[in-house]
Amino acid sequence: MKFSIQLSADYPDKSYGGDKVYADMLNQAKLADAQGFDAVSITEHHLMNCLMMPAPLQFAVKIAAHTSRVNIMTSIVVLPLHDMRTYAGEVVVADIFTEGRLMLGVGRGAFKYEMERLGVPMDETQDRFNESLSVLQALLSEEEVSWDGQYYQFDPITIMPRPVTPGGPRMMMAVMNPEGVYHCTKRGFHIQTTPLSGNHQLLVDQVSGFNRAKDEMGDAGGELTLSLSRVGFVVKGDADRREKIETANRYYSRFDNVFTGPGIVEGGMVTPLPREQSADELAESLLIGTPQEIIDKLEPYQRLGIDRVIINPNFGCDAQQTLDSLQCFAEEVMPHFAKH
């Protein structure tokens, strides 16, 4: 089982400055490169301070310039917000500039506030995503592509430059519904998923959908991987654990606002709202604990056959504490799983 760091930008205080936020994320990427993490991942979100990253491909190139080996995943890029005729070329250039380390995670978009203010109604996101994905794959694989669909109509074009790797960079699908995991795997995609703050049964069902598809595919699905994203933080003891759980609960009070609604955002700042789930219930679903406690929580993931765990430590904690937590994770948690 491999490990990645999610470089999601949490920006609860405007006075901290976007330049500092992204410098903190770059420092985490450098640590990941030095300490043996398999990958770092970058979100795409616009118009809000939660998961704030409007330019993931640009940041991927920046990371590549400061690292030498770590893979760089997008988790995820929101295809319905882009025009595939220009975006395909941007993907190729990013793949070249990252020297083949780019892993393109794609999805439909999940925040109604963000999507609809950028002109994409939520009830259209699935259809727009499906067509955008087909167009993107065609442009990355073929020359003189024309299209006559619901959202794209164009005469033959060839994106330039051509992909260095036929078909473009490795592509991953972000999907949470267990049945969706099954169908996307059957289509030949690597999978990124998360139960968010949900229960363990949802995770089991997601993994089951992935494994069922791979079993049915036989050798054709042998190389496909399942990556699981979880909020996580290594703590020093009980007091530190309580503090980080409360911080995570405040983070989810903003995240839930834009993920499940109602989407109250003022001046780019997501309004925190009361949560039905208690902090103790939330703690059960997150990877917040001492190194041994985190190992105990991760071992069932390994038994389930999860290929990569994406740890998100960016939920409002101090920048140096976050680096210290990641360093401890690399030194005391990852070696346990390297043995197996």
Image: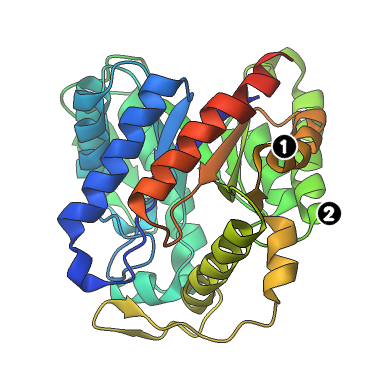
Disc 1 versus disc 2: nearer the observer: 1
Please name whichever residue, 85 or 74, is drawn nearer the observer in this view of the structure.
74
Mark 2 crowd level (few <14, some 14–19, many ≥20, 10 Å Cα): few
Q: Look at the picture and state if 297 lies above or below 315.
A: above
The local secondary structure at tag 1 comes to helix
Q: Amino acid at mark 2?
A: Gln
Residue located beneath label 2 in the image: 201
Q: In the displayed structure, does residue 282 sit left or right of residue 69?
A: right
Callout count: 2
Are the residues tagged 1 and 2 within 8 Å (C-beta)?
Answer: no
**In the rendered image, the vertical position of residue 229 relative to residue 110, given as above or below:** above
Return the x and y of residue 220 as percentages of the image width and height.
67, 17
Residue 323 image offset from top left, x and y in percent: 40, 41
Secondary structure beneath dot 2 equals helix
Which numbered tag is attached to residue 292?
1
Q: Is residue 157 visible?
A: no
| Residue shown at the point (31%, 29%) measured from the top left | 30
Quarter in which the C terminus is drawn? top right
Q: Is residue 282 above or below residue 159?
A: below
Give the left or right position of residue 54, taking residue 231 as reference.
left
Q: Is residue 100 left or right of residue 14?
A: right
Q: Amino acid at mark 1?
A: Gln
Which residue sits at x=69%, y=62%?
283
* Quarter of the figure with residue 35: top left
Q: Which quadrant of the view contains residue 33?
A: top left
* Image position, residue 169 (x, y; %): 37, 24
